[in-house]
Amino acid sequence: ARIFGVNRSTVVMALQELESFGIIKGEVGKGTQVISNTWSLLMSASTPDWSQYLRSGLFKENIPTIRMINKMEFEEGILRLGTGELSPRLYPDQMMEKVFSRLPHAISSLNYVEPLGLLELREVICEKLKQKGIHCKPTNVLITSGSLQALQLISVSMLHQGSSIFTEAPSYIKSLQVFQSAGMRLLGVPMDREGIQYWKIASERTGREEALLYTIPTFHNPTGYVMSPRRRKELFNFCTDTRLPIIEDDAYGDLWIDEAPPLPLKSMDKNGMILYVGTISKSLFPGLRVGWMVGSESVVDRLGDVKMQMDYGASSVSQWILKEILSSDVYDRYMNTTRSALKKRRDTMLTALETYFRELADWETPKGGFYIWLTLRNHISVDKLFRQALQEKILLNPGSIYDFKRSNTLRLSYAYVDEDKMMVSVGRLAAIVATCSIE
Ligand code: PMP
């Protein structure tokens, strides 16, 4: 201190600080010793221990298969046999060119929009929903950033940790994850070709706790099944009688191929017991990130308030674009073309399955949506199949990600992979299946 002309108390404070970092240690009679690699300790003292942070937080880590799917979808040359999106080849380029050219006149403001979302879009959604027997006002509609956000808003705004969510087993993995990360108790209810076996819920419900039922009645993900009109009525009555509110996810409702599906459950709802969730991600494209929820005004208002706290509203550009698409007949015309294209794709995939999988698996013909749910006849490890197929550049969605008990099921999608590659990729897959049987 004398040499550098520094005050003694400054030196003492510096030594105390180094000791608090564990870099030096002072002992009576022994003086002060450096006890560790000073540089690395100085670095670690200034770098947060991220691993500890990463173990915290609300959301759980995706399971490795999902992480792999999320990553591999963007690799070159991958045959995406499981992807739940329309192929970009089906995108309506001309329609979009016209929509984009009108935007400068159509957009009247790019400011933040009101808590429930762009009024003009909510109005046009109400108009469209009339075709499905749903009658609502713009104050019943909340625009969300994709429909998954609606599920998240419901979970974090209306339920306690540990509340029960009844779902079909199997069900859409990403919805399940939203509920699970918010601390909900997931209760899978068996389903059959007619839909969820609601009568099995009673034994799981204690009666006091908050609970909701999450269902995808139309072109269910992952099975593709459509809940029958009879089951819809019975489910609605059961939920009304037992005061179990419903979240109805209608992501695929517009994507019928052979005939229009039964009306949504929401069309029966006179007392606001159903929260109906829709999205443009499946019938058009997911990149807009626009979804909507229709429910009673009190619920919509509360979720709109939470959404403002979360992200201050969905992209207003996307909302104007969607309003423009939905407010003329272009969307309906586009959907007709898309349905014909999906029919061709579905039929090609069914032919490929008939050719290569007749002895290996069972499946139903989907009447819409994107998916064919394969149940393999031999006992097989679909996780092993997933890895083997990936080595041959085929990306699958094994059934185990939708319900861990389903170790011999696969979700195939005819929506994404190029039609001219379906035959060869399904053939290759059948050859891999033969190598994955468990003796
Ligand atoms: N619900 C279901 C049943 C889905 O299959 C999907 C997409 N795979 C979504 C919701 C997610 O839609 P969004 O992109 O609107 O969040």
Image: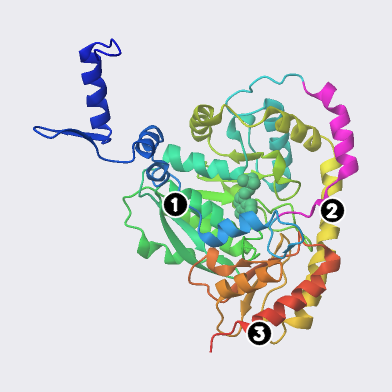
Q: Amino acid at mark 1?
A: Gln
Residue 206 in sight from this viewpoint = yes
Residue shown at the point (59%, 40%) measured from the top left? 293
Residue shown at the point (50%, 39%) measured from the top left? 153
Judge the density around disc 2: few (<14), some (14-19), many (≥20) Cα neighbours within 10 Å.
few
Residue 264 in sight from this viewpoint = no
Q: Which element is circle 1 on?
A: helix
- Say if disc 3 is inside 8 Å of ligand 1: no
| In magenta segment, residue 415 | no
Residue shown at the point (71%, 76%) measured from the top left? 429
Q: Earlier in the sequence, mark 1 or mark 3?
A: 1
Q: Quadrant of residue 52?
A: top left
Q: Amino acid at mark 3?
A: Ala
Boundaries of the magenta span: 85-107
The answer to whether the residues at label 1 and label 2 have Cβ atoms under 8 Å apart is: no
Q: Quadrant of residue 187?
A: bottom left
Farthest residue to the left: give it.
29
* Residue at image mark 1: 180
* Residue at image mark 2: 89
* Residue at image mark 3: 434
> Which label was assigned to residue 433?
none
> Which x, y percent locates residue 178?
50, 48
Q: Which element is circle 3 on?
A: helix
| Foreground of the two, 233 or 328 | 328
Q: Amino acid at mark 2?
A: Arg
